[in-house]
Image (tube, rainbow, N blue to C red):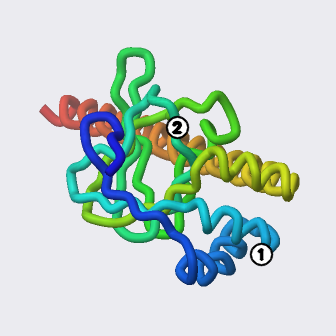
């Protein structure tokens, strides 16, 4: 068992035959050579969670890169005295690229919307993988850039929809007052 914030996560080490079997899919997911995938797979830990559990909190030290195996989770953050929902993560998503590639602190809080499983690739194993296969770091940086771009697009679209809605409401209000 591993404590993470206000909860305890059940962990299982992947090793032996299970680790070897998982190395190939992990290498494909991260687009790295099988040897690097094997290194990560042998260090990987499975984290089971229940609906409503907090996986980690914003600002806590990051343990590594998470891969969603099953379940749905929601990202939430506090910025400038506001609480924001950043969106959901689902099966196959990589979670928390920024702290793995940056300062090592979680940039948001991750909360489970359903029961599920995460695969944790520990920070030490990732550093070993970056040394063994340097292009992996750049690939993850590119994925982080795509993630930021998608988030910006979502924010921009939501903001524009809100502005359109306010204009329509104002237009409707002025027409209603004219007919009275």
- Between 64 and 95, the residue placed more toward the observer is 64
Name the residue nearer the viewer: 159 or 88: 88
Q: Is residue 19 above or below residue 119?
A: below
Q: Is residue 170 left or right of residue 127?
A: left
Q: Is residue 36 above or below residue 100?
A: below
Q: How far from the left and from the top, in percent, is residue 76?
A: 38, 38
| Residue located beneath label 2 in the image | 62
Q: Is residue 18 something that shows in the picture? A: yes
Q: In this view, does 64 lie above or below 21?
A: above
Where disc 1 sits, the SS reads helix
Mark earlier in primary sequence (1, 2)? 1
- Give the Cα separation between the discs numbered 1 and 2: 25 Å
Q: Locate residue 180: give its quadrant.
A: top left
One can see residue 167 in this view:
no
Q: In this view, does 103 lie to the left or right of 58?
A: right
At 29% from the left and 37% from the top, the residue drawn is 169
Other-residue count near label 2 (Cα within 10 Å), few / some / many at <14 / 14–19 / ≥20: many
47 left or right of 62 in image: left
As drawn, which residue projects farthest toward the top? Answer: 81
Which element type, helix, strand or loop, lies under badge 2?
Answer: loop
Q: Residue 34 carries which label?
A: 1
Which residue shows up at 37% across the image and 65% down it? 117
The picture places residue 5, in percent across and down from the top left corner, at 32, 34
The image position of residue 123, as x and y in percent, is: 62, 45
Q: Position of residue 120 (x, y in %)?
A: 51, 56
Question: What residue sits 52% from the left and 47% below the top?
Answer: 154
């Amino acid at each position: 068992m591993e404590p993470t914030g206000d909860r305890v996560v059940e962990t299982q080490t992947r090793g032996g035959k299970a680790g070897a079997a998982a190395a190939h899919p992990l290498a494909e997911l991260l687009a790295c050579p099988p040897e690097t995938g094997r290194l990560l797979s042998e260090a990987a830990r499975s984290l089971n969670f229940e609906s409503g559990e907090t996986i980690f909190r914003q600002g806590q030290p990051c343990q590594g890169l998470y891969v969603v195996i099953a379940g749905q989770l929601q990202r939430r953050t506090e910025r400038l005295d506001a609480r924001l929902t950043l969106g959901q993560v689902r099966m196959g998503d990589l979670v928390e690229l920024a702290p793995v590639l940056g300062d090592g602190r979680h940039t948001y809080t991750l909360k489970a919307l359903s029961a599920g499983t995460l695969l944790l690739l520990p920070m030490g194993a990732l550093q070993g993988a970056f040394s063994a296969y340097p292009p992996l770091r750049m690939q993850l940086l590119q994925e982080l850039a795509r993630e930021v771009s998608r988030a910006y697009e979502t924010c921009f679209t939501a903001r524009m929809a809100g502005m359109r809605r306010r204009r329509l409401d104002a237009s409707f209000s002025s027409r209603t007052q004219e007919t009275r």
